[in-house]
Image: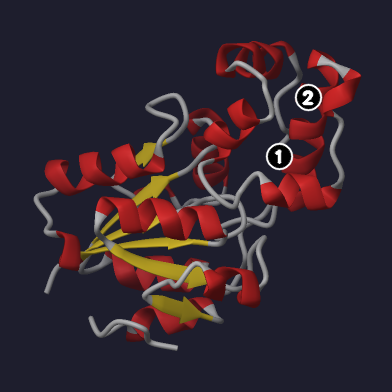
């Protein structure tokens, strides 16, 4: 059966944690020193929708986005994909539709995918420039590629990813090699927990595949 696999980017496809954390910290610092954050604070922003978490800190979203636009973008020129992810993406793309859904901007994602010759694995990239809600992007992808919720899988690495997938009604898949540890992901009650990219090839449609 042809399925729709929706992939988060940072933390699932590429190892970019330190770069992303530094960029967000710089954005918040530019807005005001009272918004400085620790690594723990940064990870807490991904317990739900990242942009909603920014607003809960008392920062208007427009202000944050303006601050981000004024900074040098994250340099992805030396950021590489997790090597064990690449053959899995290639294999899945042979029989299924793959789309990137991310809180990041589409430009840097396309840059990495093009440089690493992975662009052809994906039908589209839906970044923050399309919408800040991953739930909305998941629903858009289902409609565009004509898939039912039970035929759609969102693979993410944070508790917030799991919540947004659940709101969209699709299968939520927690990747433990990313930003949030397994116990934090497990608390978000994903439908699946995968500990290696290769585990994605064994998803069988049954829930709670732990």
146 relative to 36, above or below: below
Horizontal side, residue 73 vs residue 165: left or right: right
Name which residue lies at 43% across and 56% down: 163
Which badge, 2 or 1, is on the more N-terminal residue? 2
Q: How is the image coloured?
A: secondary structure
* Image coords of residue 172 (percent x, y): 37, 66
**Mark 2, other Cα within 10 Å: few <14 / some 14–19 / many ≥20:** many
27 relative to 95, above or below: above
Foreground residue among 201 and 179: 179
* Image coords of residue 92 (percent x, y): 32, 70
The residue where tag 1 is placed is 77
Separation of residues labelled 2 and 1 (CA atoms): 24 Å
Foreground residue among 192 and 124: 192
**Helix, strand, or loop for circle 2?**
helix
Asked whether residue 40 is in view, the answer is yes
* Discs 2/1, front: 2
**Helix, strand, or loop for circle 1?**
loop
155 relative to 10, above or below: below
Horizontal side, residue 111 vs residue 164: left or right: right
The residue where tag 2 is placed is 28
Q: Quarter of the image containing the N terminus?
A: bottom left
Give the mark count: 2
Q: Quarter of the image containing the C terminus?
A: bottom left
In the picture, the disc for residue 206 is none
Asked whether residue 78 is in view, the answer is no
60 relative to 121, above or below: above
Name which residue lies at 50% across and 76% down: 197
Name which residue lies at 90% across and 21% down: 33
* Image coords of residue 153 (percent x, y): 30, 64
Picture quadrant where residue 135 is located: top left
């Amino acid at each position: 059966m042809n399925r729709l696999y929706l992939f988060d980017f940072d933390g699932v496809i590429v190892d970019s944690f330190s770069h992303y954390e530094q960029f967000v910290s710089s954005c918040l610092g530019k807005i005001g020193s009272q918004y400085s954050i620790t690594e723990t604070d940064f990870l807490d922003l991904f317990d739900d929708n990242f942009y909603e978490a920014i607003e809960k800190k008392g920062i208007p979203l427009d202000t944050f986005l303006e601050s981000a636009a004024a900074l040098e973008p994250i340099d992805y020129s030396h950021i590489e994909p997790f090597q064990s992810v690449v053959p899995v993406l290639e294999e899945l793309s042979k029989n299924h539709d793959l789309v990137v859904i991310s809180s990041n901007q589409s430009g840097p994602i396309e840059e990495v995918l093009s440089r690493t010759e992975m662009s052809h694995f994906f039908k589209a990239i839906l970044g923050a420039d399309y919408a800040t809600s991953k739930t909305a992007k998941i629903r858009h992808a289902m409609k565009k590629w004509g898939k039912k919720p039970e035929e759609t899988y969102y693979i993410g690495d944070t508790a917030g990813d799991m919540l947004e997938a659940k709101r969209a009604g699709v299968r939520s898949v927690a990747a433990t090699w990313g930003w949030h540890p397994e116990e934090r992901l497990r608390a978000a009650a994903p439908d699946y927990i995968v500990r290696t990219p290769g585990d994605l090839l064994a998803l069988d449609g049954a829930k709670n595949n732990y």
